[in-house]
Image: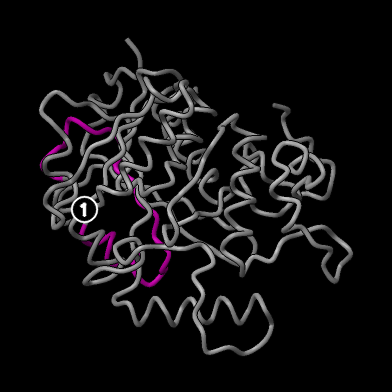
Amino acid sequence: MKKIQNTDSEKSNFHLRNPHRFRYDFDQLIIDSPKLKQFVLVNEHDNQSIDFSNPEAVKALNNAILISEYDIQNWDIPKGYLCPPIPGRADYIHYIADLLASSNNEIIPKGEMVIGLDVGIGANCIYPIIGNAAYDWSFVGCDIDENALQNCKKIIANNPKLIDAISLQLQTEPRFIFKNIILPEDKFAFTICNPPFHNSVEDANKAALRKVNNLLQTKTDKAILNFGGQQHELWCAGGEFGFITQMIYESVKYPLQVFWFTTLVSKKDNLKSIYRLLNKVGAVEIKTIDMAQGQKISHMVAWTFLSEDQQKNWKFSE
């Protein structure tokens, strides 16, 4: 395994520690994962790329990146499950590290005693993989989908270094987020979540159709989920704000067991209502970090119920 050496122009707005700030080195990626070669083409700018509207090409690229950058072998996901773009997921992890550093004398806490809770780990296990590789963090990953967790088990089993770093938990009551998951003895440095942001399957399909038309620069009436996604990964009743509202109300019940609760917010219009709700439930501190990748801007909202003294006394390592 060889780390990808990027020598091309830097992508704007990515976190400075994000190894995906630069254009993909497809030559190296193909060496590490020959299966990618069939999907690589030369675009109109005379650069190597893939067809990002093709789900199989997207998965092959992810597979190659995980081999080259994270030493993850035999990674796969079932057909139709979310295949997330790794650069954006890595940004979230690195901003989490900054958040923890802001509460730790500007030193990023590393090691297995720093434990994160991945809410909705899906079948891909991406956040724990990146967090463990970058900072040696441990994770609990939870999901309402047993098949997704079974696939995560396969990924972990095929990569022995993950066995002691990631544990999995099924949420048996889908209407809840932290109930049944955060146990009395648990202590998490952070929670991480990329919530479903559509209100219905119709909205999800419309968004997918717009994305495909933009990628293909043409008109089609067939929605292709190029990054995949099961129903519960893409939409829920109440959409993004409904999901985050439930998360905030539940977070109140675990004020001393989690340092930072965090979530991605894709719709800027939801931020004002989220702040109002967090103030209503008594969050001691609220932070927002804007993350931009290309034309897309998302926001990480973090909140804590720990007082200033409790924050100072929190031990990230024993």
Which coloring applies here?
one colour
Closer to us: 101 or 90: 90
Q: Which residues are magenta?
A: 252-277
Q: Which residue is mark 1?
A: 247
Splitting the image into 4 quarters, where does residue 65 fall?
top right
Q: Quadrant of the N terminus?
A: top right
Please tell me which residue is depicted at 29% across the width and 77% down the height of the picture: 200
Closer to us: 150 or 12: 150
Residue 54 drawn above or below residue 219: above
Please tell me which residue is depicted at 28% across the width and 35% down the height of the picture: 168
Q: Position of residue 247 (x, y in %)?
A: 21, 53
Closer to us: 256 or 1: 1
Is residue 281 visible to us here? yes
Three-letter amino acid code at disc 1? Met
Please tell me which residue is depicted at 39% across the width and 75% down the height of the picture: 204
* Magenta span contains residue 263: yes
